Image (cartoon, grey):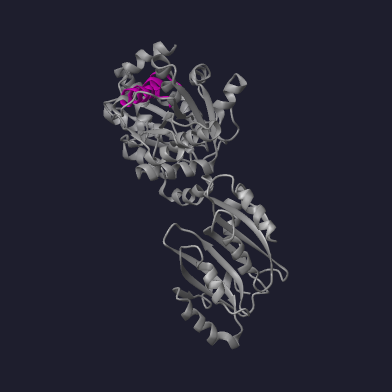
Amino acid sequence: MGPADYLKRILNARVYDVAVESALEHAGNLSRRLHNTVLLKREDQQPVFSFKLRGAYNKMAHLSPEQLKKGVICASAGNHAQGVALGARKLGTRAVIVMPTTTPQVKIDAVRGFGGEVVLHGDSYTDAYNHSLLLQKKQGLTFVHPFDDPDVIAGQGTIAMEILRQLQSLGSDHLDAVFVAIGGGGLISGVANYIKAVRPEIKVIGVQTTDSDAMLRSVEGGSRVALNDVGLFADGTAVKLVGEETFRIARELVDGYITVDTDAVCAAIKDVFVDTRSIVEPSGALAVAAIKQYVAQNKTRGETYAAILCGANMNFDRLRFVAERAEVGEEREALFAVTIPEERGSFRRFCEAIEQLPGGPRNVTEFNYRIHDGNAAHVFVGLTTHGKGESGKIAANLIRHGFETLDLTHDELAKEHVRHMVGGHSPLAHDERLLRFVFPERPGALLKFLSLMRPGWNISLFHYRNQGADYGRILVGLQVPAKDHKAFDKFLETLGYPYVEETANPVYRLFLKS
């Protein structure tokens, strides 16, 4: 079938028994930053918080009464599963849902909430899919494919139909490109067929994560490529093998592809939140991440792009990771390993070097240090940046100030693990007192602390991470001789920062005390 054939199917698709016409919203903040108009198609606002119910219901609505009586089955990482479960409840039929064991609990609970019978099997969609085929044969169920089915593709294509219709209500029907996340390819197949049939001048750009790029590899290789493994952060698009029909359509109709990494996706989730106050799942933010990358690569200005926010089924616990990585993804934060001499005053000199960086003072977003060597100290430092590509320049500047510096901004080991592991027991940390401080979150707060310290008191431990609040929480170890305890207590009073002494805390004694 060509675009004209799919156009007829899309125009006659039965989706609005369960789906709503989602909003097309102008992303004001993102548009101003990128100097292009960015429109967000809010499929995250569907009853199942994803576009998937469109295709699932359209497929099921075309089944015979006999097929509906026996029931349906599908394999899904979660969003298609919810669409099938809701559609089955609407049509009064049984739904068996096979999901990978890696599926977020929020999606499993949602499927069960719609009445679906959940079967967990395998680590990926492909594993779940193969198991669902066995169950289909055993129980005589009708399989509802998440992407490789003309009725499913047509249902997803109604999104493009709505976008083009809604453009006029925003004051202009001009659109340069639509950015679409790709898992198995059902969404982009529907969108591409409708747009190329009605407005072929509009570009359709497919988006995948760097570790789940089966469609891109397949198109480049000329045949479907099965990935051995897929990344699970963007679980909604973690597909090892794209469909036969979706591959054919994508190869013929999609204008280009972009891959984005985890940090870029986290930054895009934050961008969507800033403009909408809504939180989308990683797959739901792929299109926004791609628009930012496309603009940066092509230096465009004044164009109009639409991003389909395809889902919002996010586990709340994952937000901690997203927030941690969003600043690095946007390159608003740079990370470094810096070596400074283990001598009095070197810590302060380092802070002064940060204050003197080109472009003005930088906020310290993170600082981890534990004394362990008599000659040199290795500190893990995070600094705010004024734009992309600055981390290398900052590292070079610190080196010129005499501090050996390693840029860790793009080092996965550092970002994922090492930043949380700086510490441990140290035989050098004698006469140590441990305190938790609350510092005002502003440039110069740390330098004030260091300026008021006596030269004979040595910092032996320092841990700080910006949490986005007005005040930062800091853990400091200070080597204070017993004869100086009264003077030290007076220093704490003079400083004026709230604090709690933790020297007697058993956790400190177990993991940090010498």
Which quarter of the rendered picture does the N terminus lie within? top left
Residue closest to the eye, 132 or 335: 335
Which quarter of the rendered picture does the C terminus lie within? bottom right
Can residue 370 be seen at all in this image of the molecule?
A: yes
Residue closest to the eye, 352 or 136: 352
Confirm whether the magenta stretch covers residue 162: yes
Residue 464 locus on image (x, y percent): 53, 63
Choose top left, top right, bottom left or bottom right for residue 427.
bottom right
Give the residue at x 57% y 22%: 219
| Image: magenta residue range | 140-167
Q: Is residue 512 above or below residue 14?
A: below
Confirm whether the magenta stretch covers residue 468: no
Judge left or right: residue 486 versus residue 50. right
Q: How many marks?
A: 0
Judge left or right: residue 435 versus residue 169. right
Judge left or right: residue 75 versus residue 328. left
Residue 138 locus on image (x, y percent): 44, 25
Q: Is residue 246 above or below residue 84?
A: above
Judge left or right: residue 73 versus residue 333. left
Residue 279 locus on image (x, y percent): 39, 44
Can residue 108 be seen at all in this image of the molecule?
A: no
Residue 194 locus on image (x, y percent): 39, 18
Choose top left, top right, bottom left or bottom right for residue 24.
top left
Residue closest to the eye, 227 or 413: 413
Choose top left, top right, bottom left or bottom right for residue 487.
bottom right
Q: Considering the whole magenta stretch, tell me its main secondary structure.
A: helix
Q: Is residue 481 above or below residue 16?
A: below
